[in-house]
Image: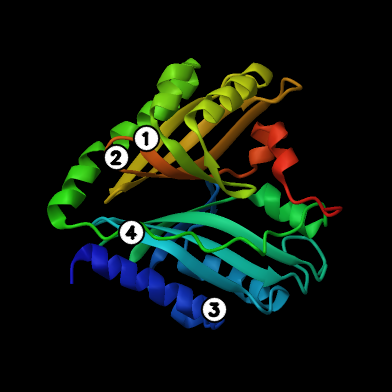
Amino acid sequence: MTAADRAIQLVREMVASENRHDLEGTFAAWAEDMKTYWNGALISSSRAQVQAGFAPMYRALPDYDREIQWIGATNDRVVFQWVTRATHGGRWLGRDGTGKHIELRGCSICTFDGERLTVARIHTDQGEMDRQLAGKVRSATARAPEASPPVLGAAEKRRMEAVSEQLARAVYESESRRDIDGFVAGYADPFVDHGPAGAMTLTRDFLRRATEELWKNHPPIHREVEEAINVGNRTTLRWRLDTVSEEGQAIKQHGCTVFEHNGRKITRSWAYYPDIVAVFPSIRALMKDVSG
């Protein structure tokens, strides 16, 4: 078994234990001095510290269930996209039980030392969860699972990984320069964006027009890519974003984006912001309003 295979096995075992509410099994894969980051902020510096927080979470979310939608690994990193579903039945994160169903999409990037997982970086839309708990939007219960990419042979996998990071970085570099031609050139025609409204198939012409409109109404954005993990025809960019709100307030967010490509163009993407509405207020129009 390769290091990558072992890392994937550990994560699958961890999630299976989570869904059984088995605390010991959940953290069996973790080093004692594990560090956990939530949307870029360090929230725990030991296994015991983060484990202590899971017991009240399980009490508050009695039907907690996490589904792995995609998982991939290198020798020292494992990336997995997931969706967590639960009913908010008790006090959690400072909020009394609401009885509301929540459905949260996320992506976790874990460091693997060959034996144990040592660092977890969790990226998910906290703002979306807060809106669901407040009853401002409906959880997206009708969203279908997102299909996994094809299995690639060794030679094709190496070829894809050689261009993955270059394709993904070029898109965000063009975004920072407000270079619309460079931005849309990175995407296939059409491509699929997995965003707040679920999977949307976008033509390049629509992408151009929508992005030009978005840039016209929003301040410039700068992203600094902090890490890239290339696995087959998917690359995950972990980034720090700086912009300002429409009111002129500074916005700083840590997030990640998973891009899938065909060796030439990006064909699908998934972006994980701490609160995408804070960065792009116009996105709110795509949300599932409770009056719908």
Residue type indicated by callout 1: Ala
Mark 4 and mark 2: span between their CA atoms? 14 Å
Residue type indicated by callout 2: Ser
Residue 257: image location, x then y, percent: 46, 43
Residue 213: image location, x then y, percent: 64, 21
Which class describes the residues within 10 Å of circle 2: few (<14), some (14-19), or many (20+)? Answer: many
Q: Which SS class for mark 1?
A: helix
User: Which residue is the site of mark 3?
Assistant: 19
User: Which residue is the site of mark 4?
Assistant: 72
Residue type indicated by callout 4: Gly
Mark 1 and mark 3: span between their CA atoms? 33 Å
From the viewer's perspective, is 195 left or right of 59? left
User: Which residue is the site of mark 2?
Assistant: 164
Image point (48%, 80%), residue name: 17
Residues tagged 2 and 1 counted as in contact (Cβ below 8 A): yes
- Do we see residue 27 in this rendering? no
Sequence-earlier tag: 4 or 2: 4
Tell me where residue 13 sits by quadrant: bottom left
Q: Is residue 206 above or below residue 190?
A: above
Which class describes the residues within 10 Å of circle 3: few (<14), some (14-19), or many (20+)? Answer: some
Sequence-earlier tag: 1 or 3: 3
User: Which residue is the site of mark 1?
Assistant: 168
Tell me where residue 284 sits by quadrant: top right
- Disc 1 or disc 3, which is closer to the eye? 1
Sequence-earlier tag: 3 or 2: 3
